[in-house]
Image (tube, rainbow, N blue to C red):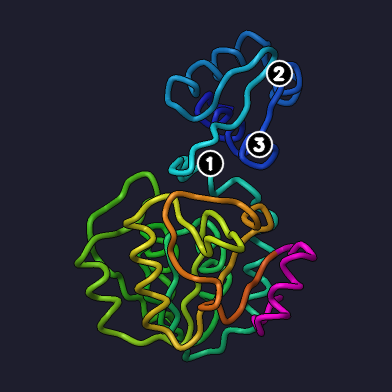
Amino acid sequence: MLAIERRTQILATLEAERRVLVPELARQYAVSEETIRRDLEKLEKEGLLKKTYGGAVQVDSLSADPPYLMRVETNKNQKVTIAEKLYKIIQPKENIMLDASSTSVHIAKKIKQLQKLTLITNSVEILVECATAENINLISTGGVLRGSSLSLVGSSATSVINKVTADKAIISCKGLDFEKGIMESNIDEADIKKAMANNAQELILAIDSSKFGRLSFAKMLDLNRIDLVVSDYIPPAWTKFFDENNIRYI
């Protein structure tokens, strides 16, 4: 395994568990503890974690935006589960908006099998994934490339979104809070997702269970804008809230 691959997986573990230990990582990757310490030092210099005695902890920054490769690997099984659930409710010939989240990439891999589907996306990864799918009408928003998320953002991207109407907008988020609503770590990303929500007949929030009760930097939308939540697991307090506010969930 290359060092960059190991560090990406370490970050993915940290995102899921919020803490890692040097001896455990050394055993997991069959390398010396000194090698793991060098990995953690490099990641700390990049501002991606904070070293502690014997390991490292997650950096608690509301505007932190982990590298794309890390986000793809984080909670991967849960995201595949979400994609399978969404595949069952999306119909052929529908117009679907997909954001540039790692969850949406897994969704695109699954739903590209559907016939005569139109996908509108600002995700470079989804554009590549679906480029050769002959049954998909693929529309790029264009825009300014944001390298850390492989997304296209800016006024030209939102302009394209505002010119169309989709059956469903499927978006993810960085956090979901009872008071603050749906939140993102970056304002440009939030603006794109808000535009998608405003130009779709149904808003679907596709999030893994780690997002419930988590705060982030930028408020994107109020919770009452959601029509459907799809997740691998929804905490009881949230199912109660959704029931009380007539928000469907799977």
Identity of the residue drawn at 53% across and 24% down: 3
Q: Secondary structure at mark 1?
A: helix
- The circle drawn on residue 13 is 3
Q: Eyeballing the image, is 199 above or below 43?
A: below
Q: CA distance from mark 3 to mark 2?
A: 13 Å
Q: CA distance from mark 1 to mark 3?
A: 9 Å
Please provide percent x and percent y for residue 240.
Answer: 76, 73
Please provide percent x and percent y for residue 213.
Answer: 64, 55
Q: Quadrant of residue 23?
A: top right
Q: Residue furthest right?
A: 236
Foreground residue among 244 and 60: 244
Please provide percent x and percent y for residue 48.
Answer: 49, 30
Identity of the residue drawn at 46% across and 40% down: 64
Q: Secondary structure at mark 2?
A: helix
Q: Secondary structure at mark 3?
A: helix
Region in magenta? 232-250
Q: CA distance from mark 1 to mark 2?
A: 19 Å
Q: Which residue is mark 1?
A: 70
Mark found first going from the N terminus, 1 or 2:
2
Q: Which residue is mark 2?
A: 26
Disc 2 crowd rating (10 Å Cα; few below 14, some 14-19, many 20+) is: some
Mark 2 and mark 1 in contact (Cβ < 8 Å)? no
Foreground residue among 63 and 110: 63
Q: Eyeballing the image, is 155 above or below 117?
A: above
* Magenta region includes residue 155: no
Mark found first going from the N terminus, 3 or 2:
3
Type of residue at label 2?
A: Ala
* Left or right: 76 in relation to 157: right
Identity of the residue drawn at 24% across and 75% down: 160
Type of residue at label 1?
A: Met
